[in-house]
Amino acid sequence: MATNGITAYSVKTKTKNVPMVDPVIDVKSGRYIATGTDGAGNKMAAILSKAKAEEHIAGGAAKKGSGW
């Protein structure tokens, strides 16, 4: 990760490592999915490992969503 927060690929702007604003991590089908927006309000999503998801939640970079 380039920054302390979660970064993802923005499909709309076609740029990599875009910081996610107010990410929420949900567990769906055993996968940890971070959803949020970029600085311009475009929706983004990233799949994380369990360790990375728990690290971001413990560090305050993300909130727990549904499925925990």
Image (cartoon, rainbow, N blue to C red):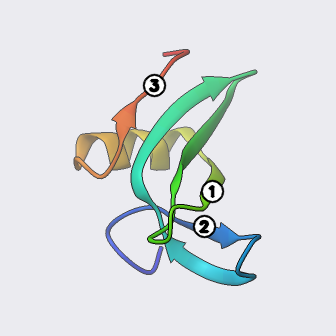
Residue kind at label 2, given as amino acid type: Ala
Q: Mark number for residue 8?
A: 2
Residue in view at x 32 percent, y 40 percent: 57
Residue nearest the viewer, comparing 17 with 42: 42
Q: Nearer the N terminus, badge 2 or badge 1?
A: 2
Q: Which residue is labeled 3 in the image?
A: 65
Above or below, 38 against 60 in this view is below
Q: Which residue is labeled 1 in the image?
A: 44
Q: Is residue 34 left or right of residue 22?
A: right
Residue in view at x 54 percent, y 38 percent: 50
Q: How far apart are the alpha carbons under marks 2 and 3?
A: 18 Å
Tell me the mark number nearer the camera, choosing from 2 and 1.
1
Tag 3's secondary structure?
Answer: loop
Above or below, 65 against 25 in this view is above
Tag 1's secondary structure?
Answer: strand
Residue kind at label 1, given as amino acid type: Met
Residue in view at x 56 percent, y 45 percent: 35
Quadrant location of residue 63? top left
**Which residue sits furthest front?**
40
Q: Nearer the N terminus, badge 2 or badge 3?
A: 2
Q: Is residue 17 left or right of residue 56?
A: right
Q: Is residue 33 left or right of residue 38?
A: right
Residue kind at label 3, given as amino acid type: Gly
Look at the numbered discs 2 and 1 and tell me whether their residues touch, using CB distance below 8 Å.
yes
Quadrant location of residue 44? bottom right
